[in-house]
Image: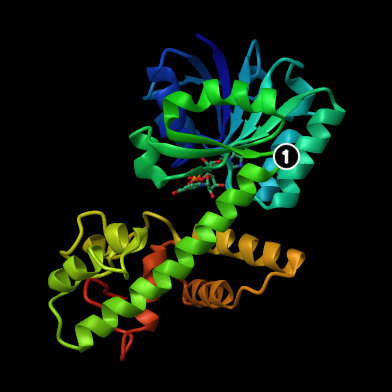
Amino acid sequence: MSTIAWIGLGHMGAPMSGNLVAAGHTVRGFDIAQASVAAAAERGVTPVGSIAEALEGADACFTSLPMPQHVRGVYDGPDGIWAHASADTLLMDTSTVDVETSRWCHTESAARGFRFVDTPVSGGTAGAEAHTLTFMLGGQADDVERARGFVQSMAGSVIACGGDGAGIAAKLVNNMMLFVSMMGVAEGSQLAEQLGLDATVFWNVANVSSGGSWPQRTWYPVPGVVDTSPANHGFDATFSVDLAHKDCALAVQAGTATGVHLPAATLALSQLDQLIEEGLGGKDCTLVTKFASPDGTLRGWTP
Ligand code: NAD
């Protein structure tokens, strides 16, 4: 069994690091928020007061941080990972960041004699709890195989995507497809309502027909149709507008950088922008459904 440093013990980091503990590893966890540290400690993570302390004797180090700038800040600087890791500590970032930040982690790690693998995840907090996340790995082949051993106990699927940054590239494309699919489900759910269809009857049709999709199965935005829908809980976040906006913006940015035309993703991003402008960044991203409603009202949503 290994000793593992974990930096960032939030919605994803706490259950993921807890699953490593359950698999028999010693996990030393650090977070700037005391509440996050306390929540992880309840899952058996050993709380520590600095990145340096987390890295003492660590075979591997994971980060799970909100934004690209947090990842850059935690790696760099006198209190950061590069200043305190040993050369045989495998460095892995599970955060969703832009491709440039991920490649920067690879390049700067290699320049300092470290091995880094991008290890973003899909499956949300439910997947983190149930250790069924999909891990998308990018990096040198031997490092990726080593990373596979560390992520296995948190994962339902582990896919080696290619070289440096390939994991994060796959993650951004996947999530862009999710937000575009969600717009279809949002509009379909409202058109079905206005045409007088029973929501569950229509869901049953879509579920076995060509309009079916992951957000249709999991997030159908009408109360009482699917158990996992945020519409059952006043559109409280399972995947917040703020995080969805970050992911969609990173995908649109990648489209601009590569010359790929993304009109549908750009529209999805503008709807998420509008929700943030309305002060709804902390609600669930399926609230985009209100833009399809004839009068902006939704069953299950009280503004
Ligand atoms: P979160 O905000 O709940 O957790 C992030 C944690 O990082 C917080 O506890 C915060 O205090 C800590 N942190 C911030 N700066 C820090 C620093 N300098 N040093 C130490 N700790 C620091 O976010 P989350 O939902 O757990 O997401 C983490 C990452 O995983 C994000 O990049 C997100 O996009 C990605 N992700 C999230 C989901 C999801 O459903 N929530 C799904 C897949 C991927």
User: Which residue occupies the foreground of this view, 79 or 2?
Assistant: 2
Rendered image quadrant of residue 111: top right
Is the CB of the residue bearing disc 1 within 8 angstroms of ligand 1?
no
Is residue 242 visible in this depiction of the protein?
Answer: no
Please name the residue shown 76% across and 36% down the image.
106
Tally the numbered discs. Answer: 1
Residue 29 percent across, percent down from the top left: 53, 25
* x and y, in percent, of residue 105 in the image: 75, 38
Say few, some or many: other residues with alpha carbon within 10 Å of mark 1 (under 14 / 14 to 19 / 20 or more): many
Mark 1 belongs to which amino acid? Asp
Q: Residue at x 50, y 71 (%)?
A: 272
Question: Mark 1 = which residue?
Answer: 164
Q: Is residue 15 left or right of residue 97?
A: left
Q: Please state if 301 lies on the left or on the right of 86 as rendered.
A: left
Mark 1 secondary-structure assignment: loop
Could you tell me which residue is drawn at 47 percent across and 74 percent down? 275
- x, y percentage for residue 204? 17, 66
The residue at the far right in this view is 111
What's the residue at 15%, 81% (across, down)? 197
Residue 19 in view of the camera: yes
Image check: 63 left or right of 271?
A: right
On screen, residue 72 above or below 142: below
Residue 77 placement: quadrant: top right
x and y, in percent, of residue 222 in the image: 23, 70
